Amino acid sequence: MSNLLIHPGLVLIIGGILISLCASRLRTGLQLGLPILALFLVWQIPDGVALQLSFLDQSLTPMRSDTLSRLFATIFALMAAVGGLYALKQRSRLEIAAAYGYAGSAIGVCFAGDLLTLFMFWELMAIGSTLVLWSASTTASGHAAQRYLLIHILGGVLLFVGIAGHVQSGAGLEFSAMRVDNLPNLLILAGMLVNAGAPPVSAWLPDAYPEASWSGTVFLSAFTTKTAVYTLIRGFPGNEILIWVGLFMVFYGIVYALLENDMRRILAYSIVNQVGFMVAGIGIGTEMALNGAAAHAFTHIIYKALLLMSAGAVLLQTGRSKCSELGGLFHSMPLTTVCACIGALASSSFPLTSGFVSKSMVTQAAADGHLLWVWLLMTAASAGVFLHAGINFPWFVFFQKDSGLRPAEPALSMQLAMLILSALCIVIGVWPQLLYQLLPFEVNYAPYTAAHVIAQLQLLLFSGLAFFVLLGYLKRTPTITLDTDWFWRRALPGTAGWLAQSTRALITWFSPSGRWVGRVSNLVSSAVGVRSPLSSTWSLATMGLAVVILLIVQLVVVMG
Amino acid sequence: MKTPHWLDRPANHRKLWIGFIVVLIGTVLAEFAWPIHGHFEIESVKAFNALYGFAACAAMVAFAKLLGLWLKRPDTFYTSETSESLPSEVNAEAKTTGVAHE
């Protein structure tokens, strides 16, 4: 059979728009069927360049595939499928449409062979994810969406300036491995790191994700950071700076999650923590490390989505997300509890779960490279993962004190989605070869040796002991912990307002014709201020007229 | 009254603790049967992973508590003040316009 060359990403993007227009029964069919079709199409793209176009004297490669592209595209399509199933009861049409557009764009990034195509899908992802967040339709989500978009526009600008400089320097548009030895490449790296949740802007992630709807967070957790991991694996393998950036993220995630009260925010910090392992692996850059980073991205998407699904189920059934108001839910939500525990064990890399077979490759790569300090820090962090997510999340939500809440299990579709992901966590953990054969390099690694299993069990179980011994210090309080987002939520607007006021006051004070300065400033604000005609909403007809006039003027100028 | 779930009965908490401690000791003893020969010398120290895991977690909790003293705020920190960005801009403009009129 000849290969079907249809872009799987476009299928999801266009399909998402169709979903938003369809009646309910057709919508359900599309919602379940489209990601599976996309998954099928991912596997139809042959290795190498599948499509090449010419654009503005540049050669674009919108479709190029290899093992790495296919691995990430596979998990993205799979995640869209299970996420779609989980979100069947989601009433917001916009959310599903946006989520599928978002997933499709992430797949588009995976197959982008050139930097311009990559950038285009990168920005589409930003729009899709912002809409997913925004569609939760709460005041908090609206504000969070604005902040989220600003940070991602910043990341996009960095990326685009970097790409422009890269092309200008004669390096061409092809997306391949780069060194950080010039400014354009540094900017490209910075743009990618913004999406990975790296410092100093990691705060965008725990600020935004927990504000989405019960199903929206599941979609958000899967694509943005992992697409960044994919682009870093392809674009910047073996850049040592990434080891330290990754290790910072790892510990940042743990420490902030330990202080956090909101269950979904705990899991959001945990995403930064886990992506930190991947970024550090990419920094190590050996075949084992890159395999580890890719494998860990794959397993992480599954168990993190599972954890967020269980949190979403709790949120939907109780309307609460603060650990200080939850507890004892295992009584009435046993299935959700078991699924959450499986996700938590997988995220802690417990033997027989998927995290064990993937994260071990990254720590093994640090050992192989004789990087003692990196290995010691990663091992400490592995213990910390069990502490901050592995026990922390299930304990405070489903056990600890009895909150008296007795919510029912969520809808069948949600239970089914959680069961599928739980099964995947265990299947990959028990039969790691299933995953290893999909990795970019050949795997010469056996995770299940007696010594490794014993070492890991000691590490994790004694972290568990630490958790229960120190439980008194880990009590949840109704607080948040300030993060770097304080700078753009409080410090910058505050400083700007203060500067504007003091400048105006100063001018009025010093200038003998202060009255005139005031008038000019009034004139300016009446012309372009918030309530000026230029800032208000215009009718379509007026806009149309303005555009026509503009075009006529342009025509006259050009013809003249 | 309905009998409480077995996990809710305090007597069982004791049993769970005993079981947990037995497993903990078991993982350390297992190292004598299957010695760990890692890449680094430090891994050969008996019960290294157990001690290191516990100590690392204690250190992280201590660090988090210290950071919390400095950075924790009530969870209404960002929402209690005027959280709407647009009205505050309008207010700011009204204020500044007021200054200009003086």
Image (cartoon, rainbow, N blue to C red):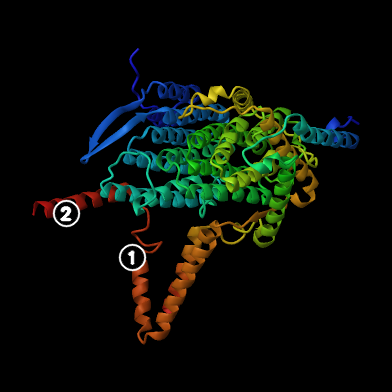
| Quadrant of the frame with the C terminus of chain B | bottom left
Vertical position of residue A423 compared to residue A253: above or below: above
Residue beneath the point at 42% across and 43% down: A236
Where is residue A42? Give x, y as percent: 41, 24
Please indicate, yes or no, whether residue A164 appears anywhere in the rendered image.
Answer: yes
Which residue occupies the foreground of this view, A523 or A2? A2
Please indicate, yes or no, whether residue A141 appears anywhere in the rendered image.
Answer: no
CA–CA distance in space, label 2 to label 1: 22 Å
Residue, disc 2: A553
Which residue occupies the foreground of this view, A360 or A69? A360
Identify residue type, mark 1. Answer: Ala
Which subunit holds the residue at mark 2? Answer: A
Vertical position of residue B92 compared to residue A46: above or below: below
Residue, disc 1: A527
Left or right of A8 in this view: A355: right
Q: Residue furthest top?
A: A1
